[in-house]
Image (cartoon, rainbow, N blue to C red):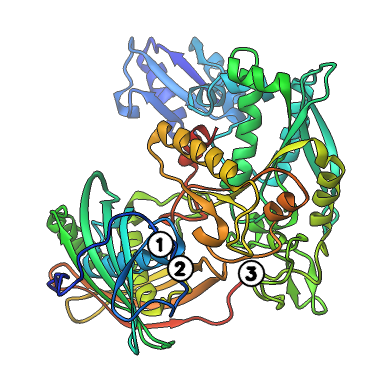
Amino acid sequence: DQVLHIVPETIQQVQHLQLLCSTFMLDLWKPLLPEDIRAGEDLHIRVPAPLVQEMKDSLAQHMISYRVLIPDVQKLVDQSMPRERSSHRQVSGGYVYTEYHPMEEIYQWMTQIQKNNSELVTQHILGKTFENRTMYYLQISQPSNKTKKIIWMDCGIHAREWISPAFCQWFVKEILQNYKTDPKISRFLQNLDFYVLPVLNIDGYIYSWEEDRLWRKSRSPYENGTCYGTDLNRNFNSSWGSVGVSFNCSSDVFCGSGPESEPETRAVAQFIKSKKSDILCYLTIHSYGQLILTPYGSTTKPPSNNEELMQVAKEAAAALKGKYGTSYRVGSTASILYSNSGSSRDWAHTIGIPLSYTFELRDTGTHGFVLPADQIQPTCEETM
Amino acid sequence: MSPVPCGDALPPPRPLRPRPALPAGGGSGARAMELPPGHFPAARAAAVAVEYLRYLRGGPGSGLRLRELQRARRQDIDDVGHKYYLELELEDVLDKDRTVSCTAEVLYHLGSKTSAPDVQLTVQGELRSTEEADKEFYNRIRSLEKELVAENIPDSHGNVPPELEPIHLLAWVASGYVIWQNSTENTKFHLAQVKHVKQVKRNDEDLQFDFVLLLHEMVSQEVLPWEVTLLWHPQRGARVPQSRAAGAGSS
């Protein structure tokens, strides 16, 4: 679409322009009504793209001179929309971190992130989901001659917890944008590698976009295809099937047919096992509840390093609260929330990863799983 | 409905050192023991109190949310049930700087699956008056030519169009009632989403909304659809003449 600037000189030209306006139903920007078009006065008229040439031909035929005021209306509209802060562009070419993204876009984002930050980021295959989709994780690692300890973080083990993958993406962006300038982040990267799995339960996440926003589990079929999905966070080999689960596929806490029965679980478990002597910290991100949860879910008996776990968690909660005043409760799942078994966090701790936490992000039930996108930024900022 | 102040013959409060909760039924007859407010037994009881208050005091112009559970005690009463004594701080979602304090007693009846917990509350402090907003909403809905229909509030991205915010808050009133009625010590409900709402025009002065509400239950992680009819009037407040769990849920 273009906007033309015309100053009609004669009454005949005015009449012709009025005719054009009504014939083509043109969008008059100035004046507002055709009857107010006057000779010698400015006329601004928006012409839809398919009519531009015909309009210009007609003006030329009637010897009406014009000037193109706006050559591309859409472009101007796009530029004026407050879509994203320019700082995001450097990291991945204009990705909007303050919106929720479907899986296709997250796949593209991962490719872009590696491309734009190849000195630090490599994308790796972890395994495949039940519906045969590839699970990728991002390794953020500063080249160095010393072997570094690993911090692992996975998001989106439960499909409906959309703020969780949003946080993983934000986290990656934040690290890559600031590692050169922020001394804390730069020190982290000197000594640690980050491994980030932005969406663990890809099949479920896609299902929550396309079919059922409040879906939780994976999408593997049971009972002859009459029932779908295992709760991946009940499927790990930590007191599997003992408490806080159901053996009925139709339940939202169905723990699967056995520990690690699900390909997603196996993909994660295999990888973590292979690297376990180097993994310092296992983080798994969920919503909602505003909680930092420590082991265990299946028993109230505290883990051997409970004091250290609690101290670190309390400091994290305090730092988090310092940002926007958001309160997070801290403690073991069994005391704070409910009993459960087969969680990834408990499993990570039992195989020897000392610092193992579940984060339940905003909020506390007001919006629950459907957290408005305008809370993505504050949630992610405080959690960083 | 005037709230009944709690504060009958309670034993003097214990020193505020949080103690691990005793297993249910293991408590002695009549003494109230201090509970850590961050742990789930107190949190679940607090949720019930808040939902009950939303039913009593909520409306199209106001919604309350729990800001902090400050203190919780539990008393195991032989042959009766478990009674929780709570001190809560609440905030008005439309006026976040305004908080009110509330003391609540939540009694879960022993072994009962069918009886709702008894809740008594005292609210200290002023809630913002919503008389104007209520009247304006009432008149707007009454003058609609076509009955209001809406679905997915909030939508998948958490958005609620401003003109539907009062309906959203009335859904809190309706879900407040259902949650209160159906809570036990082993559940914690929140309204996950309004699946569907339809206004039903009436011959009397009440507004009627038929809701399909999706309730998220934290312990089982289930999302349960409920069909709830809500009647509301600016002076008379809310009433739920009918509610039932809908057919097999999507999970």
Residue A358 in the image, given as x and y percentages of width and height = 61, 49
Q: Nearer the viewer, residue A19 or A173?
A: A173
Residue drawn at (81%, 69%) of the image: A258
- The amino acid type found where label 2 is placed reads Lys
Q: Nearer the viewer, residue B42 or A124?
A: B42
Residue drawn at (40%, 62%) of the image: B43
Q: Disc 3 vs disc 1: Cβ atoms closer than 8 Å?
A: no
Does residue B176 sit above or below A301 in this rendering?
A: below
Does residue B120 sit above or below A21 in this rendering?
A: below
Q: Secondary structure at mark 3?
A: loop
The circle on residue A255 is none
How many angstroms separate mark 3 from mark 2 (CA)? 15 Å
Residue B81 in the image, given as x and y percentages of width and height = 35, 83
Residue A118 appears anywhere in the view: yes
Q: Nearer the viewer, residue A203 or B126?
A: B126
Q: Disc 2 vs disc 1: Cβ atoms closer than 8 Å?
A: yes
Which chain does tag 3 point to? A
Which chain does tag 1 point to? B
Does residue B240 sit above or below A72 in this rendering?
A: below
Residue A260 in the image, given as x and y percentages of width and height = 82, 61
Residue A68 in the image, given as x and y percentages of width and height = 52, 13
Earlier in the chain: of badge 2 and badge 1, it is 1
Q: Secondary structure at mark 2?
A: loop
Q: Is residue B165 left or right of residue A276?
A: left
The image quarter containing residue B36 is bottom left
- The amino acid type found where label 3 is placed reads Asp
Which chain does tag 2 point to? B
Mark 3 lies on residue: A252
How many angstroms separate mark 3 from mark 1 (CA)? 22 Å
Mark 2 lies on residue: B188
Question: 10 Å neighbourhood of mark 2: few (<14), some, or many (≥20)?
Answer: many
Mark 1 lies on residue: B43
